[in-house]
């Protein structure tokens, strides 16, 4: 896996050198993120209850330039975009308790081999936080895209295990919340490992997050 990551990184560096840079949000030339698209990345946090014991706070709506920038970071190897997304993530992490451990939902092994990096971990680092890597995958899972809520729940059911975290609160971090199935399963694994409380934050939320019911709570920043 390390060799594959190095090769993927070398290919990304070569493409970055030879291909013209364009705005990830709108395609404007000669800039990673233009001023207009950067304005779309200004956080507008909202909070939703995924379950009685888990609330997720999301910085942005996954649409337009926001969606395109996140996809470019995840699927096009444009790792410098982590810096453009970091302020939004920082905004929803600013009230994390000082004793809480922050951990990202892990990438699948296939995604890590393909990309050579962990997108959420990159953004976390640029936001001034460290991923404690408390949660790991026990088995392979399918790509969640295109699956309905029940299929997503079945896909990740029992897929995560966590390191012992007895007596410590944990904040789960992911890129996008859709139905919440992944966050709920990762939170279950952390509680089984002894976490005293689990909360979640994401860079963005999709319209399908509204299917969870209830009105989102707008968070003042």
Image (tube, helix red, strand yellow):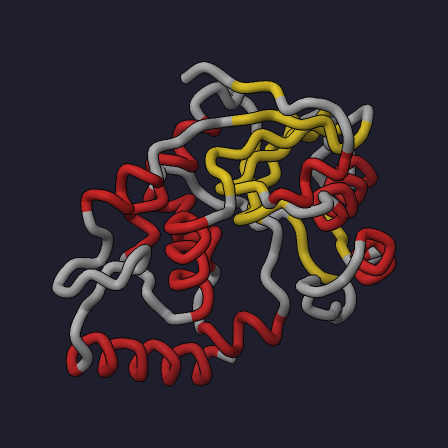
Rendered position, 32 above or below 16: above
Residue drawn at (46%, 78%), measured in percent from left and top? Answer: 2
If the image is split into quadrants, where does the C terminus sit?
top left
Q: In the drawing, does residue 171 fall left or right of residue 81?
A: right
Where, by quadrant of the figure, is residue 77 drawn? bottom left
Where, by quadrant of the figure, is residue 142 drawn? bottom right
Residue drawn at (44%, 28%), measured in percent from left and top? Answer: 44
Where does the image place residue 38, in percent across and percent down from the top left? 27, 43
Q: In the drawing, does residue 136 fall left or right of residue 31?
A: right
Residue drawn at (40%, 53%), measured in percent from left and top? Answer: 122
For this orientation, the residue located farthest to the left is 30
Where does the image place residue 103, in percent across and percent down from the top left? 57, 43
Rendered position, 106 above or below 180: below
Please name whichever residue, 21 or 78, is drawn nearer the observer in this view of the structure. Answer: 21
For this orientation, the residue located farthest to the top is 220
Residue drawn at (74%, 24%), measured in percent from left and top? Answer: 214
């Amino acid at each position: 896996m390390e060799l594959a990551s190095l090769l993927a990184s070398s290919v990304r560096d070569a493409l970055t050198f030879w291909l013209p840079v364009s705005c990830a949000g709108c395609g404007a030339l000669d800039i990673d993120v233009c001023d207009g698209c950067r304005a779309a990345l200004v956080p507008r946090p909202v909070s939703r209850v995924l379950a009685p014991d888990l609330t997720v706070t999301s910085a942005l709506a996954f649409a337009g330039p926001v969606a395109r920038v996140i996809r470019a970071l995840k699927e096009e190897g444009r790792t410098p975009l982590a810096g453009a997304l970091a302020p939004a993530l920082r905004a929803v992490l600013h009230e994390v308790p000082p004793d809480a451990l922050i951990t990202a939902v892990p990438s699948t092994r296939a995604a890590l081999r393909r990309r050579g990096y962990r997108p959420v971990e990159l953004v976390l680092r640029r936001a001034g936080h460290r991923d404690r890597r408390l949660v790991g995958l026990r088995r392979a899972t399918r790509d969640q895209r295109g699956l309905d809520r029940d299929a997503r729940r079945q896909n990740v059911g029992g897929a995560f295990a966590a390191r012992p975290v007895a007596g410590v609160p944990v904040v789960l971090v992911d890129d996008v919340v859709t139905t919440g199935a992944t966050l709920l399963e990762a939170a279950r694994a952390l509680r089984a490992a002894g976490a005293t409380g689990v909360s979640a934050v994401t860079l963005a939320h999709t319209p399908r997050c509204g299917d969870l019911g209830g009105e989102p709570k707008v968070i003042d920043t």
